[in-house]
Image (cartoon, rainbow, N blue to C red):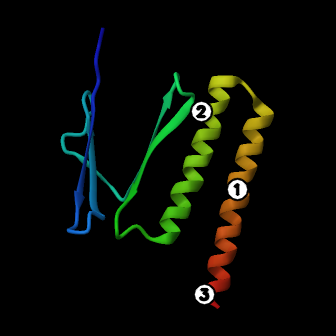
Amino acid sequence: MNQSSIKIDVLLDPNKIPEQISWSASGSTAEEAQKAKAMCIAFWDGIDKTAMRIDLWTKDMMVDEMADFYYQMMMTMADTFKRATQQEELTQDMKTFAKNFFDKFRALQIKEQK
């Protein structure tokens, strides 16, 4: 049996706010740790039937980047849900929500800039 590991390092400021996030994975072709401005990791506890999450973002993560990040995560979750369940209609509902979310965010950004 093969084993793979993912290592996440978070550099915190004196107030314990993330300044830098980097990660590496065994078996990766990347020779150095990869930097990230944000991360969301979820684990499913099958006994308690609950999701356990770690959500972190660095001080320099911009609001528009966060909207992009969430939009892409929602689209990816929809694709993953489809692969796992073959539920095409629910997948499209999730993608429609994600697109509406992002469109509303962009409209708010434009309105705030005026």
Q: Which mark is residue 113?
A: 3
The quarter of the picture where the N terminus appears is top left
- Residue drawn at (23%, 61%), measured in percent from left and top? 12
- Residue on which disc 2 sits: 80
Disc 2 residue crowd, few under 14, some 14–19, many 20+, Cα 10 Å: few
Q: Are marks 3 and 2 in contact (CB under 8 Å)?
A: no
Most foreground residue, 49 or 53: 49
Quick one: SS at disc 2?
helix
Q: Secondary structure at mark 3?
A: helix
21 to the left or right of 110: left
Q: Mark 2 belongs to which amino acid?
A: Thr
Counting from the top left corner in percent of width and height, residue 63 is at 50, 70
Choose top left, top right, bottom left or bottom right for residue 37: bottom left
Residue at coordinates 63% horizontally, 85% vertically from top-left?
A: 112
| Residue type of the residue flagged with mark 1 | Lys
Q: Considering the numbered disc 1 on the image, is that residue within a helix, a strand or a loop?
A: helix
